[in-house]
Amino acid sequence: MMESFGFPVSAGDFRFRAEARIVRRLLGRVEHNGPVLDLGSGVGYWAEEFAHSFSWVVAVEGSNALYPALEERCTPYSNIRVIHGNVLSFEPDGHYNLIFLGGLLMYLDENDVIALLQRLIPCLGSDGVILCRESTVRSETVTRTGGYPVVYRSVPDYKRIFKHCGLTLRHVERNEPYVLMQMGCELIKRWKRVVPEPFQALRVMGRLTYWGMRLGRPWISRLPKVLGIPFPSLENHFFVLGSGDYL
């Protein structure tokens, strides 16, 4: 995806490594001598990450296009079990120290989100957590249809849904690496709208934008908030959830 904005291939690796450091910090108190359930695993980057620190990982992916890449990536790891199946009908068969939903809920309508979360709660270990990584908007829900159907919800919307499910929101944190790269993507989109295609020099502008974002962090991602500018339009947040009374 980032290559279509003229970013170097390494941009995806940068974002994932930065996000992984955040996830390790958020899971610092979670017992790692136990299993992980990774629902909607995609091509397996997070399953691979968890395999290095948890004793066992169950990775579930329903996409026919993505599953072969997930299987190939996870084959070298004896502690990863890959399952090709629909996450909405998948029946967990144990208790997990961590249930990871890495950008899954935005592809589900609210009823399916609630049904899924309520089905997962009994599968949490005594001190287990659900970690959600979801793209978000600032105000009203944005629903997109067509070739890329998705539901972008606000942080208050997710809080409401989690409360309805009986989950405790232990921590919410903006995904700064994602936001940084999203700023670059939205700047390039604006560049494409105002500059005729023959003069866009996307390969040059994309790399200049990417390195400008990286060299300017962390203050550059905080600047819009300081100036009162709602930019970028799309953000991303981590939600750490536990079972029990909502606080």
Image: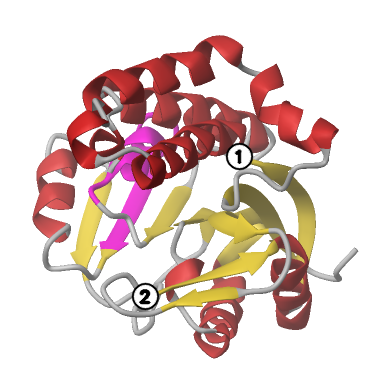
Image coordinates for residue 38, horizontal then vertical, percent: 40, 56
**Residue drawn where x is 37% and y is 80% of the image:** 145
Q: Is residue 213 left or right of residue 10?
A: right
SS at mark 2? loop
Q: Which quadrant holds residue 189?
A: top left
Mark carried by residue 175: 1
Residue at screen point 63% across, 49% down: 237
Q: Residue 182 or 209: which is nearer the viewer?
A: 209
* Residue 97 highlighted magenta (yes or no): no
Residue lying at the far right of the rendered structure: 247
Please indicate, yes or no, whether residue 5 appears anywhere in the rendered image: yes
Point out the image quarter for the N terminus: top left
Q: Residue at x 45, y 67 (%)?
A: 94
Label 1 sits on a secondary structure element that is loop
Q: Which residue lies under the disc numbered 2?
A: 149
Write the start and end of the magenta stretch as one range: 43-60
* Quadrant assignment, res 229: top right
Give percent across and percent down for residue 180: 55, 31
Foreground residue among 155 and 169:
155
Query: How is the protein colored in the picture?
Result: secondary structure
Instruction: Kindly identify the amino acid type of the residue bearing the numbered disc 2.
Output: Pro
Position above or below: 112 against 147: below
Mark 2 neighbour density, 10 Å: few (under 14) some (14–19) many (20 or more): few
Magenta stretch containing residue 57, yes or no?
yes
Can you give x and y, in whole percent of width and height, for residue 203 in the image?
A: 23, 24
